[in-house]
Image (cartoon, helix red, strand yellow):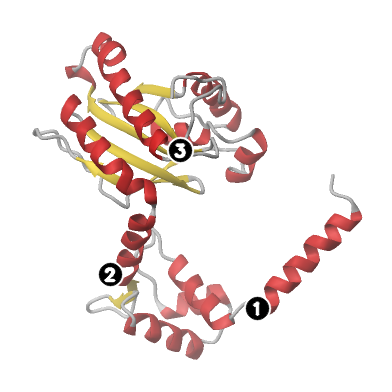
Amino acid sequence: MPDADQLVGEFKDQDRAQKYIVPGLQRGLQILSAFNRDRTEIGAPEIAKELDIPRSTVFRLMQTLEFMGFIEKVKNSSEYRLGVGVLSLGFEYIASLEFTELARPILEKLRDDTGFSAHLVIRDGWDVVFVLKFAAKDTFANSVNVGLRLPAHSSILGRMLLADLSDAELKHVFPEGQLFKFSDQTPTTLTEMEKLLEEDRKLGYAIGASYFQSGIGSISAQVRDNSRRVVAAINVIYHDSMVKKSDVEEKYLNRVLQAASEISQLLDYHPGSVNGSTRI
């Protein structure tokens, strides 16, 4: 438990931070944050009610965001949706991540060597975000695109990132403790997930079939940097019915681990006993 002096210090830090916040900018960002995959179109009255600010203020803020290309008016409607300006910022952020450029040739070669689609993801809160994709050169329909978000607990890739967190950090990410079920294999409580993550920590990789999408198999591995923390995860996906289990474990797994190790080494990670794994 923090002592009284620590609590006073934290409150002072918060007060100092509040002094420098620009309300208009904060509200503009709150408007952008109101959009998500389930809520793609929003009207000004909704925003005014949610933020508890005058409609005239919301109107000026949304006009500014529209002028800058961050939102746009929905045709034949009074509602707005996100504009290409937000997408551009997202791609600029992805491009600024050093390891995406370092990982690009390695991930492309992984795709070529295995014949499977290869991806790299990072974690943003309780989601994983796809930042690199190299699609398989066959007829395998892959709906994954750069920028796609998936709930971290619902995918093998997400488990690779969550496995690096402590119990306290997991509870911070999932404060309610209940997890949405996507398949028969999806953990629905923190207790169930922690059991899976314990095994993932020992191995440093995970193999799953029909974990998020029926019929799709995945081999995932962790990417670490010089702090020894997991900063990303990579995977390949394949039709589960078309690949022998023995090939997955004896042939493709080693190739995925090798690619993860190569990226980690470029990030100045030095292998050692981390979370019980010495594989990467």
Residue 229 on image: x %, y %? 53, 37
Front position in the image: 248 or 79: 248
For marks 2 and 1, give the one nearer the viewer: 1
Q: Residue at x 22, y 77 (%)?
A: 75
Quadrant that contains the N terminus: top right
- SS for dot 2: helix
Q: Residue at x 80, y 68 (%)?
A: 12
Q: Which residue position is annotated with label 2?
A: 84
- Please state which amino acid type lies under the numbered disc 3: Asp
Q: Quadrant of residue 173?
A: top right
- Please state which amino acid type lies under the numbered disc 1: Tyr
- SS for dot 1: loop
- SS for dot 3: loop
Q: Quadrant of residue 249?
A: top left
Residue 103 on image: x %, y %? 31, 41
Residue 238 on image: x %, y %? 22, 26
Q: Which residue position is annotated with label 3?
A: 268
> Is residue 95 positioned above or below 82 on the image?
above
For marks 3 and 1, give the one nearer the viewer: 3
The Cα atoms of the two marked residues, 3 and 1, are separated by: 36 Å
Q: Which mark is residue 227?
A: none
Q: Residue at x 63, y 40 (%)?
A: 169
> Is residue 223 positioned above or below 75 on the image?
above
Q: Earlier in the sequence, mark 3 or mark 2?
A: 2
Number of residues whose C-alpha sits closer than 10 Å to that of mark 3, classed few (under 14), some (14–19) or many (20 or more): some
Q: Earlier in the sequence, mark 2 or mark 1?
A: 1
Q: Which residue position is annotated with label 1?
A: 20
